[in-house]
Amino acid sequence: MSASAPTGDRPAAPSLATALRGGAARRRPRRDPDAPGTLAAVVPDRDALVDLGFAAVLCSIALVGMRTGFLGVEWVVAAWVGLLLGLLVGHLAGALRWMALTTFLVLTATYFLLGGPVAVRDNLLGGVVPTPQTFVDLATWAVTGWKKWLTLLPPVDARGAVVALPWLAGLLGGALTLGVARRWASIPLTALAPIALLAASIALGTSQPAALLVQGVGFAAVLVAWLVVRSHRTRPPVQNGAGRGVRLATGAALAVVALLAGTFAGPALPGTSATERREVVRTRLVPPLDVSQFASPLPGYRRYTEPNDAKLYDQVVLRVQGLPAGTPVRFATLDHYDGLVWGAADRSSDGVPFQQVGSRIAAAREGESAEVRVSVPDAGYVGNWLPTVGDPTRIEFSGPRADELADALWLNTETDTAVVQAGLLGGETYAMTAVLGPTPARELPKDLDVASGASTGVDTDFLDARIDAWTSRAEGGPWSKLRAFATAMRTEGTYTDGGTPNSFEKVYLPGHAVSRLTRFVGSSKLAGNDEQYAATLALVGQRLGIPTRVVMGATPQAGGDVRGKDVHAWVEVRLDDGTWYPLGAQTFVPSRDKTPSEQQLKTEEQKVGAQVPPPAGVSPPSVLQGPDQAQNATDLAKRKKNPFDVTAWPLWLQVLAGLVALAALVALYLVGMRWLKRRRRRKHVAAGPVPGRAAWVWRDLVAEARSLGVAVPRRVTRREQAHAIDAAVLEASLVPADEGAPAPAAALPDDVVTVSSVAGAVDAVVFGPGDGDPASTDALHEHAEAALTTMRSGVGRWTRVRSDADPRPLLVRRERTAPAGPWWRRVRVPSLPRRGGSDPTPA
């Protein structure tokens, strides 16, 4: 079958592939002079400007929900710049009718190329040009950054790579909201993107609402107004424009009613009360930090005493500048006892977990603040517990390990305990701003309004005899008894750090497990140091029902130096108002010069037997470490690096591997889509009645033509659709003639398979007599495949790639021959098939 122009001499017919390429010279086809240019198409008209304004306001209101999750103004700039660029991309996608893949590629390029100067500014060249590390940060935070942000302590310091999140949210929110609005006229579809953005900002926010009235009432009012305006565009005027004012007035009245109803009824709705806890994603997310992996500092207290192998008693372990005199430095708050050790719990008694923080931290309370600078000398303080002061509001590291320490800084705001996973090794320096808390009491108050209800899951019956003996004369409640017990410990106990290896005091072992404390309190005279006294007093407080915890830290000397002898352990008790009152070590630990006597030891040995110290050179294992940990650590150090560990590769190799993997995924996607489409076409000609098979051959061919960019009309006959496709081929085959020359004629050669011939063959099968021959559908399928192959060979490579990536041919269904009604009228209830076979597929 052929088609030709009605006028002019007929030249040698070009092949269909040559015709689709635009002629032998591959010239660009002539543009319609009446068609608007590209510049005119992208200039927004009145309707586009209205949609742009509404989309900008709605997305801005939705992004307000991120306010409680960030600290600073950097995130506002990133979110707004992303929103403006997203609106621009959405407008261009709607005006130029971009495919979804094209829009995605433009958004991806915008995110990575401009994400450096706008959001991730740490590794830029000259402050503008992104580096490979910038692309890695942007890609990492776009995928896994959301979970990391949810595990950080809100509000998060809006500096660094975390700003990529509001930048991405604004970019995607603006592009989807305006792009959908300019591409489709559906009213429900218009509201989908802004509502999804609002829901995401609320769900990923904090338990503190960002702006109830703005996000609730304001968002609803603006959205209703926009939907009313868009609905007004699609409705024809009644009586030559009459009734338009009535509809606008009705829409305005509905918006006002919704605004008033939300204003007055909103505060009464569930979840709006300040006393109710707001459930968001981060409240249900358990932070991925197990603090039990870090050994408690209390079992290592003897490192700071004398004599000991570490020799830290007179050595400077910390230098603290800017701290008021008498203010302690906190190493760790130990609020959980498991029978072996006092350690830090993953969550405090109030359920507050350890959360990863940035350099700036939101203040939990008001009070006097101090600017403190801490330096760790070599061979000084070591460990994962970061020494802090009061309630930290800023922690900034400096030095060669600054990034390594700052990237994994965790803080519990209830216990004011900080952890650095990389650990302090000596030589680190960091600055800190903190709200100062109360200093440990040097004398026990007579009256103290303590809280109640504390209990421990460990059996501490061994304390009862000593509690009864020392608190029997105490008058008052639990605090009076705890005060009497602490006073008796200080006045009747003795102090020892274990003495020298040849001293009789070597039998007083370190540790504070139940077995060690049982021996400690069972002696006629207590003998130990801060470790045993603080651990025992905290357990006594819990035995009396008072919430207690142990704190290990130090009080700097006048010059700011912290030596080993300045390190102590004290106890904190909880008051009725929820605050914690510190009891200084001097209130319950006896003086260092009050040492046990050898005669006392002999008396104890006669009663309970001799205490056998561990063999020389063998230290008791840390309670939070397994006995094989040292061997395991040695094995890990000797283990060779895995060459398949991507994190150990150089940065350039990681980037190259990522690009290769991305290219492989794209190629796999294209090959997979082509295979699925071919399999679907083959499946349609192998099942069902013959007329239905033939009809599916035509539907699949039309779907492939549309994926190649051909505008095929809907709800017309197959012959009319085939005529449109052939006309597009003929128009592409026309070669522009010289000025004044007659228009050349073009025709399709007789030896190629045209779409019109396929349409005629399909009609012959569908409307032919009888049920048809199944063999004819196979021939018809081959006929259509030949037409599709010829059609694809005549387009450019980029057009073929776009067609291969287009998933729409996989989603094609029976075409409707009647105007589409509301969606609820098109819902079909599934029913059982009739006997005698399935119904024939309509043509």
Image (cartoon, rainbow, N blue to C red):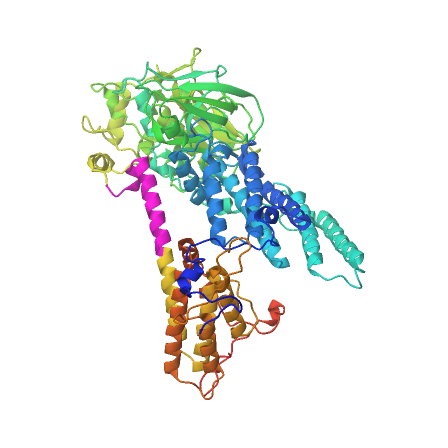
Q: Residue at x 41, y 60 (%)?
A: 18
The total of numbered circles placed on residues is 0
Location of residue 629 by image quarter: top left
Depth check, front residue: 713 or 317? 713
Q: Picture coordinates of residue 73 (x, y %)?
A: 57, 32
473 lies above or below 35: above
466 lies above or below 556: below
696 lies above or below 467: below
Residue 61 placement, left or right of 249: left
Residue 209 seen from this side: no
Q: Picture coordinates of residue 386 (x, y %)?
A: 40, 27
Q: Picture coordinates of residue 624 (x, y %)?
A: 32, 36
Q: Is 284 one of the magenta-colored residues?
A: no
Q: Residue at x 50, y 66 (%)?
A: 725
Q: Residue at x 48, y 53 (%)?
A: 28
Depth check, front residue: 595 or 365? 365
Depth check, front residue: 173 or 465? 173
Location of residue 570 by image quarter: top left
Residues in magenta? 643-668
809 lies above or below 359: below
Q: Is 654 one of the magenta-colored residues?
A: yes
Residue 537 placement, left or right of 181: left
Magenta span: helix, strand or loop, mainly? helix
Q: Picture coordinates of residue 289 (x, y %)?
A: 39, 39
Residue 226 placement, left or right of 313: right
